[in-house]
Amino acid sequence: GYTVGYGGQFEAQQSASRSLALVGGAVLLLVLMLLNISLGSFRAALLVALNLPLALIGGIAAVFIAESPGVFSNAFALLTGDGYVAPVLSVASLVGFVPLFGIAVRNGILLVNHYAWLQANEALDIRDAIIRGSAERLVPILMTALTAVLGLVPLALASGLPGSELLAPLAIVVLGGLASSTFLNLVVVPVGY
């Protein structure tokens, strides 16, 4: 007649993760629809949405590096299968993906809109529009990332200190995701366009 039940923080984290996944899926569909309306092309909307997995790569890698006990020994244990301890994506880390995805989508919109504008108003062919558009949007994209980095580095460095339980994981996710999405955005979006 005995049963095992998990409660407390574990139960709250499972509930929050389910809620975030459900709401996140609905928001993703809504964002795709709005991007389609805004950009006038479903292909361009998908290209901009491609920034989401690019940001996800860096965010998860940052959590892996920052929250794993003994990163290098843990990476070796992952490769060999001996004693691997998986880092936990906390609710604060999951919430960090929200602003990260916003910045990543904004950067993609900046590029795709500018390419289309150059083709329509400057009568450039696609290759010249991509080269010129990437050069002209490089500074705004890097400044957005740099501004966020300057604001979030102190929060990430405070990881482990009292009171940083919520903001430090959020900052770590955003910093890692910004690194990957900014770099990959400037490579993948022009090639995809």
Image (tube, rainbow, N blue to C red):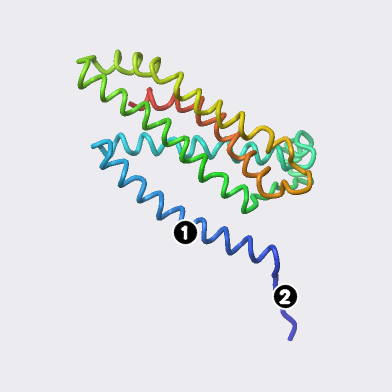
Q: Position of residue 91 (x, y in %)?
A: 62, 53
Which residue is depicted at the point 58% across and 49% down? 94
Q: Which residue lies under the disc numbered 1?
A: 22
| Closest to the observer, 121 or 89 | 121
- Amino acid on which disc 1 is placed: Leu
Which residue is depicted at the point 72% across and 42% down? 67
Q: Position of residue 56 (x, y in %)?
A: 53, 40
Q: Secondary structure at mark 1?
A: helix
In the displayed structure image, the side of residue 183 where residue 38 appears, left or right: left
In the displayed structure image, the side of residue 88 where residue 115 appears, left or right: left
Q: Position of residue 107 (x, y in %)?
A: 43, 30
Q: Position of residue 134 (x, y in %)?
A: 39, 18
Q: Secondary structure at mark 2?
A: loop
Nearer the observer: mark 2 or 1; the answer is 1
Q: Which residue lies under the disc numbered 2?
A: 4
Quadrant of the rendering where the C terminus is positioned:
top left
Q: Is residue 161 above or below residue 6?
A: above
Q: Residues within 10 Å of mark 1 (few under 14, many from 20)?
A: few
- Amino acid on which disc 2 is placed: Val
- Of label 2 and label 1, which has the lower sequence position? 2
| Closest to the observer, 136 or 73 | 136
- Cβ–Cβ below 8 Å for labels 2 and 1? no
In the displayed structure image, the side of residue 118 where residue 188 appears, left or right: right
Which residue is depicted at the point 37% across and 28% down? 110
Q: Is residue 173 above or below residue 20?
A: above
Quadrant of the rendering where the N terminus is positioned:
bottom right
| Closest to the observer, 179 or 153 | 153
Q: CA distance from mark 2 to mark 1?
A: 27 Å
Q: Residues within 10 Å of mark 2 (few under 14, many from 20)?
A: few
